[in-house]
């Protein structure tokens, strides 16, 4: 075997033993690099006579072609192997069924809100929304709840480290009742000078906050305020609104309604509203679902209206309670734990 055959054989063996592209490039340098074995051969041609140059040159070129062919073949083989490994690692089974995206659902309490809005909407009530961080005046004083009055103590529970213009601490509203005042004042301003003033008929559902936490109370809960003010609105209207509402909400006519005398500073007279189902698991039990009453003249004055002329009623309902009764849930905390096993039952 001549020296060039040997060189080609060495190169083929070196390339074949290069396990990765980087090793192959190093092996290539040994033959085709600046001072590689083939390059040295080519350099040596300079010292030969023209005839020798011609024949030797042709031999060297043939050897070079073989080396390059071996190099390219190995390059291709390594690239193929790499692609193969990659395809194996990333195998894709196109026959597998597609992955399903969960569709989610409306939270049960949001459902209650939507239902309440639809039912009261059909009775001509607007829907109002307002701040959850309230001033002392709107949460208490405007609602005839004087400063330092003991009736406040059950309600003034969460404060924000910030004061309003009057110097009073802001609070997390303990009920939606401030919305009566906010909405009625805006209404009175909007229709100032219009006689007769269009009636106020509004509900205001939303979040409320109190220090309370057990199976039926949570520090954040939901209420819906209602207000109907006109020149000839009475308790009779309140009763029919409630009767219609509860029958529609619970989808049954077998339901009794009871007004139980009570006290709220912002209404006079005041009543607690109880319902009882004539059938089902809660049959015959009186359940408290809200408070109500004829709006107190002092509160009507704080609406910016004349209590001799503008009268009506207000009410507040606990939405968490209504949701629990509608779906037969006995622990409120499920609504706020974020456990999908519980929540997905309401989809
Ligand atoms: N704000 C009362 C509460 O949280 C509920 C209430 C009672 C609202 C009577 C009213 C009402 O508008 O007239 O306990």
Image (tube, rainbow, N blue to C red):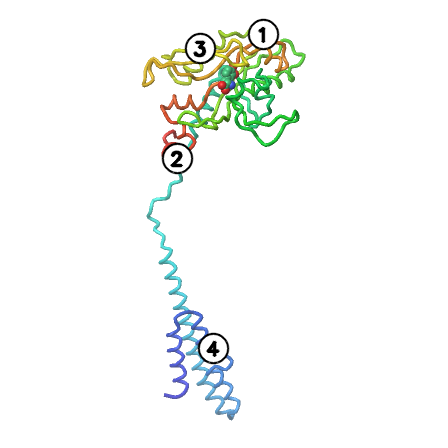
Spatial separation of the CA atoms under disc 2 and disc 3: 37 Å
State the image coordinates of residue 80 (x, y, percent, origin top left): 39, 65
Between 296 and 162, the residue placed more toward the observer is 162
Tell me what residue is drawn at x 32 percent, y 17 percent. Answer: 280
Residue behind mark 2: 339
Mark earlier in primary sequence (2, 1): 1
Q: Quadrant of the C terminus?
A: top left
In this rendering, the label closer to the viewer, 1 or 3? 3
Badge 1 marks a residue whose secondary structure is loop
Tell me what residue is drawn at x 39 percent, y 62 percent. Answer: 83
Between 27 and 131, the residue placed more toward the observer is 131
Q: Residues within 10 Å of mark 2 (few under 14, many from 20)?
A: few
Residue behind mark 3: 260
Spatial separation of the CA atoms under disc 4 and disc 3: 100 Å
Badge 4 marks a residue whose secondary structure is helix
Instruction: Determine contact: label 2, label 1, CB under 8 Å.
Output: no
Badge 3 marks a residue whose secondary structure is strand
Residue behind mark 4: 29
Q: Residues within 10 Å of mark 3 (few under 14, many from 20)?
A: some
């Amino acid at each position: 075997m001549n020296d060039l055959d040997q060189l080609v054989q060495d190169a083929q063996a070196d390339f074949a033993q290069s396990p990765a592209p980087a090793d192959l490039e190093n092996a290539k340098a040994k033959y085709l690099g600046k001072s590689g074995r083939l390059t040295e051969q080519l350099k040596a041609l300079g010292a030969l006579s023209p005839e020798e140059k011609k024949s030797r040159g042709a031999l060297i070129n043939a050897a070079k072609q073989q080396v390059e062919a071996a190099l390219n073949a190995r390059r291709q083989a390594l690239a193929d192997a790499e692609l193969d490994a990659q395809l194996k690692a990333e195998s894709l089974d196109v026959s597998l069924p597609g992955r399903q995206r969960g569709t989610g659902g409306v939270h049960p309490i949001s459902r209650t809100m939507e239902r309440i809005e639809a039912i009261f909407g059909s009775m001509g009530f607007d829907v109002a929304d307002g701040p959850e961080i309230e001033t002392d005046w709107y949460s208490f004083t405007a609602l005839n709840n004087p400063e330092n009055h003991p009736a406040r103590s059950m309600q003034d529970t969460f404060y924000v480290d910030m004061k309003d213009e009057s110097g009073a601490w802001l609070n997390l509203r303990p009920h939606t009742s401030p919305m009566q005042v906010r909405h009625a004042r805006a209404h009175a301003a909007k229709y100032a000078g219009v006689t007769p003033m269009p009636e106020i008929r509004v509900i205001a559902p939303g979040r409320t906050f109190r220090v309370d936490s057990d199976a039926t109370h949570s520090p954040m809960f939901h209420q819906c305020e209602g207000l109907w003010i006109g020149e000839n609105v009475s308790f009779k209207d309140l009763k029919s609104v409630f009767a219609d509402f509860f029958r529609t909400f619970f989808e049954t006519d077998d339901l009794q309604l009871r007004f139980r005398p009570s006290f709220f500073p912002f209404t006079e007279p005041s009543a607690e509203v109880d319902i009882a189902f004539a059938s089902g698991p809660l049959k015959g039990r009186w359940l408290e679902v809200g408070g109500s009453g004829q709006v107190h003249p002092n509160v009507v004055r704080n609406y910016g209206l004349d209590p001799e002329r503008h009268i009506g009623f207000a009410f507040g309902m606990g939405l968490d309670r209504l949701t629990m009764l509608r779906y037969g849930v006995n622990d409120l905390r499920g609504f706020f734990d974020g456990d999908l096993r519980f929540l997905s039952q309401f989809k």
